[in-house]
Amino acid sequence: MTQARPPRAVAGGKVRVARLTDLAALGELSRLCQDEKAVTRSLGLPVSGRPIGVFSLFRLPLGAFQPHDLMYVYDEAGRLSGLIRVERDSIRDEWTIVELDGIGSGQAGDIRFRLVNQVLREASKRGPWRLHVACADRDGNVELFMQAGFARYGDERILHRTGEEALPAPWSDEQARDCRIRPTVALDALPLSRLYAAATPQPVQRLEGIRLADWERQGTNWRVPRSSLAPILRFADVETFVQESAGGGKDGTDLDGFVQIGVAKEDQPHYLKLLVRPDADAASLTSFALGVIRARTEKDAASHEHGVIAPVRTYEAPIDRRLEEAGFGTIATVTLLMKDTLVRVAEPGLVPAVR
């Protein structure tokens, strides 16, 4: 059995930090990597095509760029042939690779390998806790990141509800109370952590390392639960709601479900993320969330053009079935990968000495 070798180095070019003067070239590079006829390689998030593309979702390259983010390009004699963009979460000290493009029939893989290595070298200097990436399992994406030391830990289905289909009517306050649905508050951090633990396998919990303090973050800074499409929340008004358990459980604070809603402010789909206990039904929370999106957008008919997009982990079934019943359909499946930059060590302890 032969071991896979890393791509060979590319001659004649260099990796450098992107500049503001690269804006036009970067925009063309991002768009070109969505053209199925072009000889390119990209992460493939979430689909290639006109209705929903990487460029329209993340508003790349510089529309979503923040001062603490990173962007590198591959420059070959003044021509940009590669791009990598990293979103940095300064609160959790995590990095997420949200775009990785390469152009060329024989060199695209080599260019992308050099760009990823540049990010890893930068990470070794700045010391983030971990790096994340989500990509389609094609064009050597998964193999590239695994060669760079990333571990594959899950898959996520991307479901989409077209804007041509009318959204359900908004719920009244009485309907929401009858179904025990209300907005989240900071005191929900512990119940949300318990809900996440009930709905997520323990190996994934250990890898993602979501802390109690992360559940206390409200509004547009909310980045949990993690998904492959979380970067689009930068261009959305984020609201979160919970559904209380009947009776409240042992201490009166148990939750059956949680929904994160991102109402798009840009030319992109709205965002919907559900987290539900395995023994709970997500149908009412789904209908309520779609009604919230309609209530926030009914004054602007054009805002429904791109519909609603929802990521669902493979282990989160039957949430996907409830979404399909609400008019969603699967448009892509992506792979989730992660690389720890810190070495995990056992906690030291003292033992009695015997003489």
Image: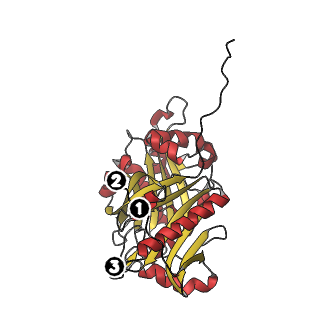
Q: Relative to 161, is 200 on the left or the right?
A: right
In the image, what residue type sits under mark 1?
Arg
Query: In front: 70, or 109?
Result: 109
Q: Nearer the viewer, mark 1 or mark 3?
A: 1
Which residue is pictured at 40% across the width and 80% down the height?
104
In the image, what residue type sits under mark 3?
Glu
Residue 251 position within the rendered picture, expressed as x and y whole percent measured from the top left: 55, 30
| Contact (Cβ within 8 Å) of mark 1 with mark 3 | no
Task: Work out whether 137 lies above or below 185.
Answer: below
Quick check: can you spot residue 172?
no
Find residue 36 and name its label.
3
Find residue 5 and name its label.
1
Find residue 320 and name its label.
2
Residue 84 position within the rendered picture, expressed as x and y whole percent measured from the top left: 52, 71
Which structural element holds mark 3? loop
Which structural element holds mark 1? loop
Label 1 vs 2, first from the N-terminus: 1
Q: Few, some or many C-alpha atoms within 10 Å of disc 3 (few <14, some 14-19, many ≥20)?
A: few
